Amino acid sequence: MKVAYIDQYKNLFGVQPICDVLAETDAPIAPSTYYAARTRPSSARSLRDEHLTEEIRRIHEANYSVYGARKVHAALLREGHEVARCTVERLMRRAGLRGVIRAKSPRTTRPAPETARPADLVERAFTASAPNQLWVADITYIRTFSGWVYAAFVIDVFSRMVVGWQVATSLYTDLALDALEMAIWRRRHASGDLTGLIHHSDRGVKVDSTDRRNTSTLEVLDGPASGMGHTADGASGDAVAGAAPNPSGGGAGFLDEDRRGDDQRGGGGHVRRIPSGGVPLVP
C-alpha cells in the first residue's frame, strides 16, 4: 500500500519528500525500501495469485457472473488446479468478484385450518371430454430484476389452454379472482357454454366461495349445477397448473399439444381453431 501511494504522488512531490513525511507517521518507509520493492522480481506467490485470478475471472464470466467462491473453487478443481477454497475467496474478494445470493422464495400457500373449505368436486380426476367442463387454477411467483412477481392462471383441463391470467407485484385475493373473471369473460365472448363448469384450485389459491367478488362471479354463470368457486379439500400444495394428467396416461403441461383439433383459440371477435397436433401458446 505504501509503495502504491508513493507511485501515485512521486511525480508531484518526489520520492524522498514523501518518505520524509511518512517517517513521522505509523507507516514509515525508507527510499531504499521503495526502490527495492520496485526493482525486485515478483514472488512466486504473487505470480500464482495473478494466474489464479485470471482463471477465476474466466470461470466467473463464463457462468454469467453468478458463481460464488464455492462453485468457482469446484470448477477450478475439475480443471486440475490445486488451490484451497480460502485462496479462492481471498482472490475473489481482492478482484471484486462475488456470486449471486439466492433470495428466499416468497410463501404463497397459507392455509387457515379453522376456515371451512368447500367440497372437492374433482377428487384428483383431472380429465374432461369437452371445453369448459373443468378449469384448474393456481398461483405461482416469478423472480425478475425488479423483484418478485405473482401470476395467477386458470387452465382448461380439456385443452391445457390458459383461459385466464393475472399478474401483480403483490399477493392479494383479487389476483386469483381477476384471472377467473377474465376466463369467464373470454369464454362467454366466444359463445362458450359454462353450464356445469367446475373451477378447481388447491388450498394455496386465494379463492373463497364466501368472497364478495366471487358472489358476483357466480351470478354470471348458467344453471344451478355450476361448481365455480370451489376449492380442493386435498392436501396443502396440491398445485395442478401444468400438471393435470392426460387421459392416455402421460402427463401434459398447460403448454402441451392440444388433444383435438376442434378447440377454439383467440380472443375478442377473432376465434380460430388450432389444427390437431399443434402447440397452443399463452395468449
Image: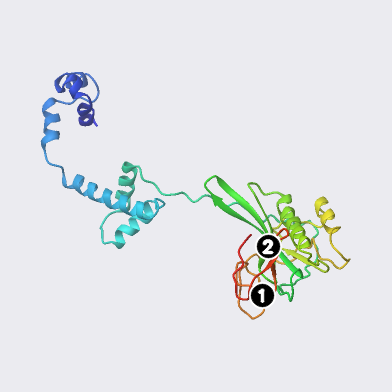
Q: Where is residue 208, by image quadrant?
A: bottom right
The outermost residue toward the bottom is: 248
Instruction: In this rendered view, identify the residue nearer to me: 213 or 74.
Output: 213
Q: In which quarter of the image is the C terminus?
A: bottom right
Name above or below for residue 1 compared with residue 208: above
In contact (CB < 8 Å): disc 1 and disc 2? no
Q: Position of residue 226 (x, y in %)?
A: 84, 66
Question: Which of the marked residues, 1 or 2, is nearer the chain's N terminus?
Answer: 1
- SS for dot 1: loop
According to the picture, the residue beneath numbered tag 2 turns out to be: 266
According to the picture, the residue beneath numbered tag 1 turns out to be: 261
Instruction: In this rendered view, identify the residue nearer to me: 234 or 201.
Output: 201
Instruction: Identify the residue at horizontal 30%, vertical 46% (top origin).
Output: 91
- SS for dot 2: loop
Name above or below for residue 78 compared with residue 10: below
Instruction: Identify the residue at horizontal 16%, vertical 47% (top origin).
Output: 44
Name above or below for residue 130 compared with residue 29: below
